[in-house]
Amino acid sequence: MKLTLPCCARPLSGAVEVPGDKSLAHRAMLFASLAEGESEVRNYPDSGVTRAMRGALESLGVPSSLEAGVLRVKGNGFRPFPNAGATGYCGNSATTIRLMAGAVAGTGSSATLDGSAGLRRRPMNRVADPLRAMGAEIATDDGRAPLVFSAAGRLKPVDYAVPVASAQVLSCLQIAALGASGASRFTVPGPVRDHTARMLGSMGAEISSEGFVSTVRPLARPLRSLHATLPGDISSATFLFAAAALVPGSRITVTGIGVNPTRTGILDVLESMGAVVSRANARDEMGEPVADVTVAAAPLKAVEIKGDLVVRSIDEFPAIAAVAAFAEGVTVVREAKELRYKESDRIAAIVTQLRALGAEVDEFDDGFAVHGGTLTGGTAQANGDHRLAMSMALCGLRAPVSVEGAEILNESFPSFVPSLVALGVPEVC
């Protein structure tokens, strides 16, 4: 599928909703399977990555249904999955395989976790090694999927320093630690998303955090079932906010999105580049802060992004790069080597595709630099990366751009194009 967004002569405006947060959806499905009783979760997104979690759990014996955005799950409790020895296919979703690894290990299940060729290239020892230290028996293919778990006894508590600031790794270990014989402590080197601790805490788990140290106590009672509504996904909203920043005079509001401070780096970046960002109608859902967020266009200037801000916007760099291509000056991203281990090597992919569109871009081992005002147009490749597909397509709002392989955007944001049309983008093809 080739996607071409037309250059916009008129501002974009309006208020839209986006599908439920994918990070929370993964956790809601998995944690509901580990709870007692039936859970009901509204605004559940139906996309490729969320189907991976549902499908993998159903293969292991946890039934679920999804109708009109309402997910229902019959929990198995925190015990071995019913279909012993089954294979849970995780598609291209690293979140699915890493979080499920914690659940399989913590419940002492016998299972295999596998995925696509792309997922098989992702590093898995970052979860397998600490799980082995807790007593799990795991075989890998040279540190990559498939992960083959043998049934094991109760895990041992550990005091473990997580080498990378990764929410997927920390979440995996926190989930596993619920089944350990004593309290475990995990120390991360910097800020990470805390969705797992928040949601499990709302279900009755004892997870506390002080600074960069998380303490998890084994379950003293069954996890309560979930009955909640997922906030909108700020990662999806990012592409609409980027559109607002790119088209002069635009003003776009996305209602009811999660604004967890570990996820709002994109708002800080856009604001520092000159866009006007505001919030309204603040409230809480499932222990998560939620708000209506508005981004309005203003002259864009280059910025430098590094440190904690990288962690808080780690999934948003393709969109940030697209905006930077039209900012005044050189936007520099450093200390972001983790981008090389996403759905694609996102540093190399961002650099290659922006260059294909005529932009001047420098590549570093841990980041890149985009020279604003140099992008002229052309054809970009999605490279099997949903975020890259949408980000390169957004450049078409300011220059003649087409993206090949854009169907991959259905993995995460199937309503991307309809949302842009609703905001004023004409004649999308």
Image (cartoon, grey):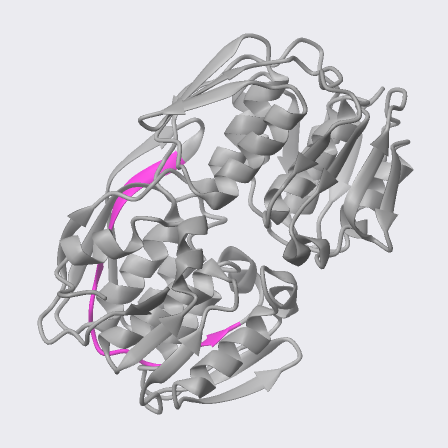
For residue 16, above or below residue 420:
above
Q: Is residue 226 visible?
A: yes
Q: Is residue 123 left or right of residue 196?
A: right
Residue depicted at 12% across the width and 61% down the height: 424
Q: Does the stretch in magenta take in 151?
A: no
Quadrant of residue 390 within the rendered picture: bottom left
For residue 23, above or below residue 313:
above
Task: State the count of labels.
Answer: 0
Which segment did they paint magenta?
289-305
Residue depicted at 66% across the width and 53% down the height: 119
> Which image quarter is the N terminus in?
bottom left
Between 324 and 59, the one nearer to me in the picture? 59
Where residue 50 sits in the image (x, y, percent)?
49, 38
Residue depicted at 58% across the width and 84% down the height: 363
Q: Is residue 303 visible?
A: no
Q: Is residue 103 left or right of residue 47?
A: right
Q: Does the stretch in magenta take in 298?
A: yes
Residue depicted at 57% across the width and 35% down the height: 53
Quadrant of residue 265 within the rendered picture: bottom left
Where residue 208 sits in the image (x, y, percent)?
64, 30
For residue 8, above or below residue 360:
above
Give the residue furthest to the left: 10
Where residue 364 sits in the image (x, y, percent)?
62, 83
Q: Is residue 304 left or right of residue 421?
A: right
Q: Is residue 282 left or right of residue 10?
A: right
Where residue 275 sits in the image (x, y, percent)?
26, 68
For residue 176, above or below residue 124:
above
Give the residue furthest to the front: 1
> Which image quarter is the C terminus in?
bottom left
